[in-house]
Image (cartoon, rainbow, N blue to C red):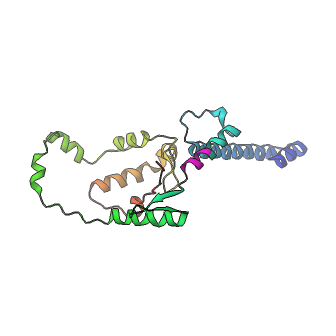
């Protein structure tokens, strides 16, 4: 940036002014991206624009990281384990066991005890394929300061690029409602352990 300013001062041509302006725009863009990352790391809804990049703001991020770090965990036998590798093993074992259970449901009479709260019209509406406006409303109801998903995009991306990506999103959602299955990529979940 400093080099562009020096070139502009020495030459002062239309090209040097244009290059300086491009550099300033790029610099502002990167500052905004850094700001968004810090806001997500701090997870503060009351974040104000003037609070960015202060020692206080960075100390919030450090304190949050320290308070969320797991030092010990109970395993399936009730024993306490320490260390990242041991905790990882316990977590993987727990979720493998949890998600691989084979549930046997044989008593369908129980379902008759559940009162019907949904009318036929409500049921038809719930089963209808959503139109573009409904999908857009769902996308724009997402919190813009939420953390990004496994794909690296948060809802701000979907809000700002809606006119470009809306056809793909609408097509994907409507195909899902028509019975097309989702690949593992779309079902991929990032599990975060939060200490009690």
* Residue at 19 percent of width and 40 percent of height: 122
Query: Which is nearer the eye, 185 or 25?
Result: 185
Left or right: 110, with 51 as reference point: left
Q: Quadrant of residue 132?
A: top left
Q: Position of residue 196 (x, y in %)?
A: 46, 48
Left or right: 19, with 168 as reference point: right
* Residue at 37 percent of width and 55 percent of height: 172
Magenta region, residue range: 63-68
| Residue sitting at the far right | 10
Q: Position of residue 40 (x, y in %)?
A: 56, 44
Total numbered labels: 0
* Residue at 48 percent of width and 49 percent of height: 164
Q: Position of residue 70 (x, y in %)?
A: 53, 55
Q: Position of residue 188 (x, y in %)?
A: 42, 60
Q: Is residue 143 above or below residue 192?
A: above
Query: Which is nearer the eye, 154 or 134?
Result: 154
Q: Is residue 175 above or below residue 88?
A: above
| SS majority, magenta | helix
Query: Which is nearer the eye, 13 or 100?
Result: 100
| Residue sitting at the far front | 79
* Residue at 42 percent of width and 43 percent of height: 139
Q: Is residue 48 above or below residue 96?
A: above
Q: Quadrant of residue 47?
A: top right
User: Quick check: can you spot residue 33?
Assistant: no
User: Quick check: can you spot residue 177?
Assistant: yes
């Amino acid at each position: 940036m400093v080099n562009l300013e020096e070139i502009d001062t020495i030459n002062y041509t239309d090209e040097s002014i244009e290059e300086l302006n491009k550099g300033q725009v790029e610099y502002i863009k990167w500052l905004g991206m850094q700001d968004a990352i810090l806001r997500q790391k701090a997870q503060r809804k009351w974040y104000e624009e003037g609070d960015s990049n202060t020692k206080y703001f960075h100390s919030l991020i450090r304190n949050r990281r320290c308070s969320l770090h797991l030092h010990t965990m109970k395993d399936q036998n009730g024993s306490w384990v320490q260390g990242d590798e041991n905790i990882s093993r316990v977590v993987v074992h727990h979720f493998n066991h949890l998600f691989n259970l084979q549930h046997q449901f044989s008593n369908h009479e129980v379902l008759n005890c559940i009162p019907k709260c949904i009318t036929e019209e409500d049921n038809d509406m719930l089963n209808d394929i959503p139109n573009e406006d409904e999908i857009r409303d769902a996308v724009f109801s997402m919190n813009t300061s939420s953390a990004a998903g496994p794909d690296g995009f948060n809802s701000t991306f979907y809000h700002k690029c809606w006119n470009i990506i809306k056809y793909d999103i609408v097509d994907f959602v409507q195909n899902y409602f028509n019975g097309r299955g989702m690949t593992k990529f779309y079902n991929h979940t990032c599990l975060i352990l939060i200490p009690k």
